[in-house]
Amino acid sequence: DAGVIQSPRHEVTEMGQEVTLRCKPISGHNSLFWYRQTMMRGLELLIYFNNNVPIDDSGMPEDRFSAKMPNASFSTLKIQPSEPRDSAVYFCASSSINYYEQYFGPGTRLTVT
Amino acid sequence: AQTVTQSQPEMSVQEAETVTLSCTYDTSENNYYLFWYKQPPSRQMILVIRQEAYKQQNATENRFSVNFQKAAKSFSLKISDSQLGDTAMYFCAFMRQGAQKLVFGQGTRLTINP
């Protein structure tokens, strides 16, 4: 299996621009998670989906952030407009609903200037 | 809310030595899971080992083992015969049974010196 796939690996954008991060979960997994990693806050869960339905989005920082999962093999995390404080590494992870192990993608390093 | 604390921001040992990373957590739950993840410089998060709280036996995976003390809410990771490739950030994580949400500690930066 290819594992969790994220794109792009690196993204540099200017403040105010829209940013879209993409994730393909492991085939057969029906839970998908978006995490953010920063020096100040560490690793924190932003949102997760079960069977393409958002279950808990309490970690989403503000309305500038949105996430979708239109089908079982694709999810996006969008930031509009982006701000310098959004600079972080964003991870996508997937798992089976009935099993607790989460498998992480390689992450997207976002830099907002 | 659950919290996870890793009290050692950095550690450094010589190759082939044994090293123990500490982790404590705070929860009122009785059923939960604990994990250690490794994040090498490539930044990929890799699951190293897991422990189910209902199991008394400590989990082991090759050179990696844990010391799970449920009453003390302690979950340390022991790496035996350390190798250069073990150099990484190590994160302890907690998951309440049925919750799916991972709560991470702040991490310990481990350096293995040749």
Image (cartoon, coloured by chain):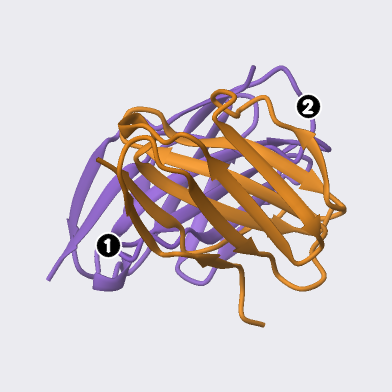
From this viewpoint, is residue A36 visible?
yes
Distance between the alpha carbons at the discs numbered 2 and 1:
33 Å
Residue B87: give x, y in percent of width and height. 27, 62
Q: Residue pushed farthest bottom?
A: A1
Could you tell whether A53 is left or right of A18 in the image? right
Residue corresponding to mark 2: B30
Observer-nearest of B14 and A50: A50
Could you tell whether B2 is left or right of A79 in the image? right
Residue B68: give x, y in percent of width and height. 58, 41
Q: Is the Cβ of the residue at disc 2 closer than 8 Å to that at disc 1? A: no
10 Å neighbourhood of mark 1: few (<14), some, or many (≥20)? many
Q: Is residue B22 above or below residue A68?
A: above
- Colour of chain A, in one word, is orange
Q: Which residue is pictured at 24% across the width and 40% down the height?
A: A113
Q: Chain letter for purple, please.
A: B
10 Å neighbourhood of mark 2: few (<14), some, or many (≥20)? few
Residue corresponding to mark 1: B87
Observer-nearest of A71 and B44: A71
